[in-house]
Amino acid sequence: MHPLRKQRLQLVILLVVAAALVIGLVVYMLRENGNFFYTPAQIISGEAPQSTFLRAGGMVVDGSVLRSDDSLWVQFKITDGVEMLTVEHTGILPDLFAEGEAAIASGKVDENLVLQATQILAKHDEKYTPPEVAGAMNAAYKAKQEAQGGSYK
Amino acid sequence: MIAEYGHVALIIALCLSIAQAIVPMAGSFAGYRTWMRLGHSLALGQLVFVAISFACLTTAFVQDDFSLQYVADNSNTLLPTQFKISAVWGAHEGSLLLWALILAVWSAAVALFSSHLPLVLSSRVLSVLGAISVGFGLFILLTSNPFARILPFSPTEGGDLNPLLQDFGLIVHPPMLYMGYVGFSVAFAFAVAALIGGQFDSAWARWARPWINSAWVFLTIGITLGSWWAYYELGWGGWWFWDPVENASLMPWLVGTALVHSISVTEKRGAFRSWTLLLAILAFSLSLLGTFLVRSGVLTSVHAFANDPERGVFILAFLGLVVGSSLLLFALRGPVVQRQQGDTEAVSYSGLSREMMLLLNNVLLISAMAMILIGTLYPLIADVLDLGKISVGPPYFNFFFVPMSLGLMVAMGFAVFSRWKKTDANMLLQKGMVPFLISLSAALILPLFLAESISWETYSMTAVITLGASFWVVTMSLEDLWQKLDRGSSKAASNVSSRLKSLTKLPGSYWGMQVAHIGIAVCALGVGLSSVYDVQKDVRMVPGDRVEVAGYEFTFDNLSFVQGPNFGASRAQISAYKNDRLVAVLHPEKRKYEARNQVMTEAALDAGLTRDLYVSLGEPLKGDAWAIRLHVKPFVRCIWLGGLMIGLGGLLSVMDKRYRRRRKPSTQSGTEATAL
């Protein structure tokens, strides 16, 4: 084979092998590290897996925030308008966290269906609602309307 | 009236850019030199009118003209003047106007500093830049007009700028970043012009190289500033979040870095031609993709302030047009460029050579970019395909990026020594011996002293690997420098002073490479060591409390209330002691911005080269108690110091004398004309 062609062939083989390796790893890592978003209703109904890392979001229920007196432990409830999910967290809450506002908690759901959160995210400014939360609230609202419409029949 | 002048100026600029896109290009095919020359004046005219438009919007901000929707949304009478000016680019419409202004600045720079280029080439470059301007001009005027009025009922007070953006960081970070993003449009225009002309050789690479390097310098500095800003302003001590918007700036940087290396091969050896062109197209396409991701509001992200589907569709269509047409051009004309390569002497290189090392660099950088691209777009694709709402976290990105960076650093050490065409493997191993031993011992010994105590539990493998890789890059670079000096001085007087004298003889591009490579090592050192030895404590404190974190004693002295220009703040005084000696007095604040009723954490930090002390106020608890985050972050400064060094390296390379030598255009334009 012509030396230049041979060199090219080696290069192509190297690239193909490297690309295949990288793509395989990427797919695997995406499966391992992709965190799914669930609504409180999905978690309460048991649709969401337990003890896997996930995210849940909704509106923080008014009057549900409980603070410990001597530590940074905090408990609150979030709702999508259908169900309420209890979230527990130890640490500092974000600046824009407030009752009646949207929040996203990431962590694992324990056997009591309480989300043990390692991170709490709130909206970034006062006009913004995370799209997942807005979507979940809308879906829940529609489902409620349909359910009410059905009961009149 | 001022806003209307700004609006009209923007429309005139759009008309000029339409002419700039068409006339010089048509002239270059028809051979009308006056038409081709027109591109230069049109580019300057466009700059004048975009600048007028930008000045008008700035004036509207300074004069608190709340009849403008954009000003009313993003400013306030109480906002300090420097933030009123930076608020111009604080949100969607204005940041696009800044983009247009910077594009006009680059175009004008090309028009002014291209007298040594063949007219056919420079006119086509300006034409392509004009076409990009048309796209952005239309985008601003049709979907995102910053001069839209709210009449007749205009508000008397504005909604204020997002408090996170009321900071020095907003003044410098976006302009720098945009200079980089938009700068790649020049590289793109050069590539398209080369493809149209079918002529692409070492001379082309020498002309395009300073432009590509300067864009890359701006992007490097822009990303560094962004990371530093996020670190102190977001309030919680992180400096990189793998946020889609950060990824959007890192991807063009990675491709730009590959391009900076690949074009050196094209210039020096005439190889990698099509690849260099493809990288130039890719770098700008990724800049546009970044704009789409940030500006269309498709992402859940810190930066996604805008949310308007109409805009998203426009940018997506523009992105499709630019990428599609340039790739089509590449497919049609790439073989022409390649065939030309056969005319000149055959470019060959062996399995171990500087060409191969730079190829390895490119493969690693492009792979890193590809996996970031996948990780960034995967949630969007999954959402569109209804596979659920997924977010891809830092573990995914770190898993790929960290080993690839380490691989790059190992290769970097050898690459400095490798020669064009063929390198002797034994020579490389021989040269690498001393640096390897130094790095190995530094990597094994230093972690003992960096940890709090000498024990196996605190001995960190991450620190060993980081130190090893960083020392390897630095020692290899220094050894090469030492030998270069040896060669520069005469054999007879090979002593230290003559070596130092020959320092000045080395070219700027060599110094650029050295500084940038050592900058990578410094940055890696900061990333690795700060992640290993970072100590963070979230604590509940009342005034008088004392907490120990990583050898530092923090005392909560008192809490006071202070009034800022447009906010009120609870301000804590926290003193840090080491061995009972006062090191720093810190004043973290919890601010409440009145106009938006928004709370914001203003962290306080004591910066140092070897460690940062970082304190932020969480939230008030019962009584006098506060939730407080105390951080000791060793070597975190090295991250940005390294970033600045990388930028400085690029700057030294841009200033290399080689690129300033004016070439007579006569011979080149002759061949260019025949290539038509």
Image: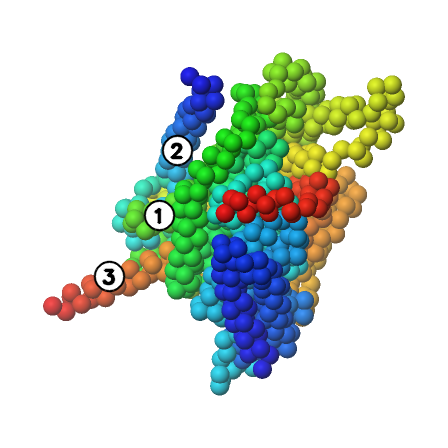
Please tell me whether mark 2 or mark 3 is closer to you in this view: 2
List the residue tagged with mark 3.
Answer: A143
The image position of residue B205, as x and y in percent, is 59, 40
Task: Identify the secondary structure beneath mark 3.
Answer: helix
> Residue, x 50% and y 78% (percent of image)?
B149
In the displayed structure, B659 sits above or below A26; it is below
| Residue identified by numbered label 1 | B381
Q: Quadrant of residue B393?
A: top left
Q: Position of residue A89 (x, y in %)?
A: 47, 48
Query: What distance separates the C-alpha of mark 2 from that of mark 3?
Result: 40 Å
Q: Amino acid at mark 2?
A: Ile
B248 relative position to A17: left or right: right
For badge 3, the amino acid type reads: Ala
Are there few (<14), some (14-19), or many (20+) residues within 10 Å of tag 3?
A: some
* Residue, disc 2: A23
Question: Along the line of sight, which residue is nearer the eye, B411 or B137?
Answer: B137
